[in-house]
Image: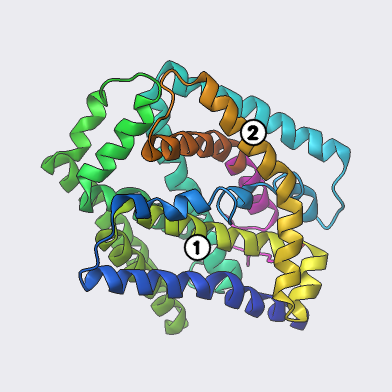
Amino acid sequence: MTGHTENVRRQLIRVTIVPGWVILVAVTLLFAAGLTLPLEYQFVPLVASVALLGLPHGAVDHLAPTRVRGRTATGRSFVAVGALYAVVGGLYAVIWFVVPIVGFVSFIMVTWLHWGQGEVHSLLALLGLEHLGTPSQRALTGLARGTLPMLVPLVAFPDQYQLIAKTLVGLFAASTLGPIDIVFSPTGRFVVGLLVTTLLIASLAVGYHRATRRRDWIVDVAEVCLLVGFFALVPPILAVGLYFTCWHSLRHIGRLLAIDPGARRALNARQYGTALARFGRDAAPLTAISLAFLGIFYWFVPVSPGTLSEWVGLYLVLIAALTVPHVVVVTWLDYEQDVWTAQPVQLTE
């Protein structure tokens, strides 16, 4: 790693890693001390994510496939990514209208894999953890980390999780959750908790065995403990909203800044505002288009949203439809940057 790239990595840690640590630690401590928050305020991070970090973090997908190769985006790449979103995202959206329960379950599964995918990249490329040295170990870590935002809230707050699920499928006139209701029972939660615990212990145990630098493994453990505590103590609507914006999205934005030559120059000069402004400029057009699709969703869903929770539910369905093609683009970035090989992960092109 060149001196320039190493400096960029250090600046990205300051801009896109440390803020997530600070916010999640602070919120976890507040709720551990007995803080309660009215439901309407718990929606704030998710509502803010429409324009701040959350929705925009995937709105540079049209530039990422070429930038990761050190090339300038072309009209052909724009068309290719646009077609990907139209076809894959559109087909997935149809599933919600036809079989909304399948749409919800697949949303949870895809997000589990995708958020774990993002964790692995940041652990390797930004935090530089060297004990994740094999493809199988990286996959295990991704599976384990993805359970934290997706499954720990189900175990800790089953009633709220169930309410969110019913709100989403209810927009498509589904009256019940059908067979998935069983996961909210004591037995279902026990099985889910056992799965989460097994994956986390296995991931950390293998990491401990293979770690040559104990500091790396301690960072891994510390993040896992923070996320477990955060999702076990903070109500899921607030917790997922904060994780989405301040952790997952911010780390992915760091990944995008690293493959943008102009942003790298700004980061190297510690001009953080300039780097983030470049990202905001790049993300603005597709963020606006995505919001237009939110309006289209409003007119087509069988049950028009009337409450704040239903509007947020509609937004989450939009996120679901955008996530599937976004995962395809991120998987391409993973391939180009050696995330799922035994090689060091490339931060820049």
Mark 2 and mark 1: Cα distance apart in space = 24 Å
Three-letter amino acid code at disc 2? Ala
Up-down relation of residue 223 to residue 240 (above or below)? below
Where does the image place residue 107, in percent across and percent down from the top left? 44, 36
The residue pinned by badge 1 equals 246
Crowding near the residue tagged with mark 2, few <14, some 14–19, many ≥20 C-alpha atoms within 10 Å: few
Where does the image place residue 210, in percent across and percent down from the top left? 43, 73
Residue 338, magenta (yes or no): yes
Up-down relation of residue 154 to residue 257 (above or below)? above
Number of numbered labels in the structure image = 2
Quadrant including the C terminus: bottom right
Task: Say what secondary structure mark 2 lies in.
Answer: helix
Where does the image place residue 148, in percent across and percent down from the top left? 35, 56
- For the record, the magenta segment spans 327-348
Residue 174, quarter of the rendered image: top left
Q: Which residue: 68% across, 41% down?
A: 288
Crowding near the residue tagged with mark 1, few <14, some 14–19, many ≥20 C-alpha atoms within 10 Å: many
The residue pinned by badge 2 equals 292
Residue 341, quarter of the rendered image: bottom right
Q: Are marks 2 and 1 in contact (CB under 8 Å)?
A: no
Task: Say what secondary structure mark 1 lies in.
Answer: helix
